[in-house]
Image (cartoon, rainbow, N blue to C red):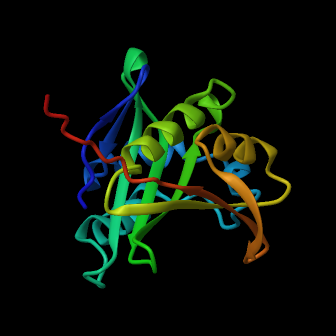
Amino acid sequence: MTARTISTRRLDLLPLHVEHAEEMAAVLSDPALHTFIGGTPDTAQVLRSRYQRMTAGSPDPAVAWLNWVIRLRNESCLTGTVQATVSPGVRGAVAEIAWVVGTPWQQRGIATEAAQGLADWLSRPPVHAIIAHVHPEHRASAAVAAAAGLTPTNERHDGEIRWHRSVRAVTSAIHRS
């Protein structure tokens, strides 16, 4: 699988490029974004190095790293990121998704719209299931996961709740009269 531009009502999810690092360093500069995920904001130089590794792809040929920046079309600015790691699973590929939206653009439905667009794009073969991991106290992220069609499970991963969405293959029948 390869990341392609995904357009929603207000957003363009653009495949990640190293050149996005400068603008994204500003978008992700608020330390509050790290409340649930830990760490501190990265500099543009650190993001550039990370984006070089990410765009080079996974060292495992069976795993696809798909990364996008979120562009708010009417303001022509980047507002965050979405990502999917697609790995082989027992019944088909599993896509683990994540999202982050910069503080100035939060509470505007951007994360929800981006996650929905991503989940809908992933809801085709070979993907069989979409998962996300959400901190149990991160209500906003839980709302995004729910809006993207994921439901919480009883499973935990590093203290986070595993959310799940099954993808049903759509088959079409040709009817002849």
In-front residue for pair 146/54:
146
| Residue at x-position 74% and y-position 57% | 152
| Residue at x-position 55% and y-position 50% | 99
Q: Locate residue 79 relative to residue 102 in the image: left or right.
A: left
Looking at the rendering, in which quadrant would you find the C terminus?
A: top left
Residue ranking furthest to the left:
176
Tell me the quarter of the picture where residue 156 sits: bottom right
- Residue 51 in the image, given as x and y percentages of width and height: 34, 62
| Residue at x-position 25% and y-position 81% | 61
In-front residue for pair 139/93:
93
Q: Locate residue 145 relative to residue 19 in the image: left or right.
A: right
Q: Locate residue 51 relative to residue 40 in the image: left or right.
A: left
| Residue at x-position 31% and y-position 72% | 53
Looking at the rendering, in which quadrant would you find the N terminus?
A: bottom left
- Residue 125 in the image, given as x and y percentages of width and height: 32, 57
In-front residue for pair 95/176:
176
Residue ranking furthest to the right:
137
- Residue 58 in the image, given as x and y percentages of width and height: 31, 77
Residue ranking furthest to the top:
74
In-front residue for pair 46/154:
154
Q: In the rendered image of this protein, does residue 69 appear above or below residue 40?
A: above
Q: How many circles with numbers are drawn on the protein?
A: 0
Residue ranking furthest to the bottom:
60
Q: Locate residue 70 relative to residue 113 in the image: left or right.
A: left
